[in-house]
Image (spheres, grey):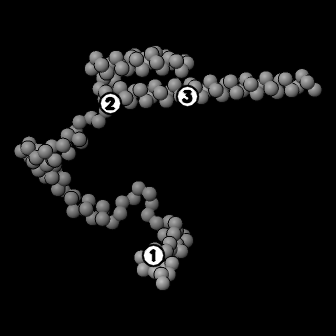
Amino acid sequence: MHHADGPGTIRPSANRGRPFVNGNPGRKPGSKNRTTLVAAALLDGEAQHLIRKAIELAKAGDPTMLKFLLGRVLPRERLIKLELPNMKVADDAVEALGQIMRAVSEAKIAPSEGAALAALVNAYREAIDIAAVVKRLDALEAQIKGGAETHR
């Protein structure tokens, strides 16, 4: 006969959600733990030597080290300049997306940059749609309230 609390059954601790006793908030957010502090102390003064060694390995053809260093050196994003129409109504998004597609097809911007811009355009179009719906609802509520007051 198996019991509900048999082997392999995990029971939640009574302290769940409260790992410290009252009055002990734990480590401050952003403060470093002991392992990080020890590692930093061990590396103190060695950083320049380690960086030189990493560069030597990368120059010697170590692909992992090359990728690691390039990931730190090369900019992750670049600023791009693309003229897009001023979006006042949701339909303006069609023209904006067309210009983004054209820029990608002409290799003026990378496909990933085009996708990021398209996401921004779509988010802005959605905001325009929501604002338009709110305006229409406000107008309908005003009509309903105005109509109710004239029937009194």
The crowd level at tag 1 (other Cα within 10 Å; few <14, some 14-19, many 20+) is: few
Which badge, 2 or 3, comes first in the chain's sequence?
Answer: 2
Q: Position of residue 18 (x, y in %)?
A: 52, 68
At numbered mark 2, what does the secondary structure look like: helix, strand or loop? helix
Name the one closer to the observer, 15 or 147.
Answer: 147
Which residue is the extreme one toward the right?
Answer: 152
Q: Residue at x 29, y 26 (%)?
A: 110
Q: Are marks 2 and 1 in contact (CB under 8 Å)?
A: no
- The amino acid beneath tag 2 is Ser
Mark seen at residue 112: 2
Q: Position of residue 54 (x, y in %)?
A: 13, 48
The crowd level at tag 2 (other Cα within 10 Å; few <14, some 14-19, many 20+) is: few
Is residue 24 visible in the rendered image? The answer is no
For the residues marked 2 and 3, what is the alpha-carbon distance in whole angstroms?
23 Å
Which quarter of the picture shows residue 150? Answer: top right
At numbered mark 3, what does the secondary structure look like: helix, strand or loop? helix
Q: Decide if residue 23 is on the left or right side of residue 147.
A: left
State whether residue 56 is above or below residue 140: below
At numbered mark 1, what does the secondary structure look like: helix, strand or loop? loop
Which quarter of the picture shows residue 72? Answer: top left
Q: Position of residue 144 (x, y in %)?
A: 80, 26
- The amino acid beneath tag 1 is Thr
Of tags 2 and 1, the one toward the viewer is 1
For the residues marked 1 and 3, what is the alpha-carbon distance in whole angstroms?
49 Å
Q: Decide if residue 117 is on the left or right side of residue 17.
A: left
For the residues marked 2 and 1, what is the alpha-carbon distance in whole angstroms?
48 Å
Mark seen at residue 9: 1
Which badge, 2 or 1, comes first in the chain's sequence?
Answer: 1
Q: Are marks 1 and 3 in contact (CB under 8 Å)?
A: no
The crowd level at tag 3 (other Cα within 10 Å; few <14, some 14-19, many 20+) is: some
What residue sits right under mark 3 in the picture? 127
Q: Position of residue 44 (x, y in %)?
A: 21, 58
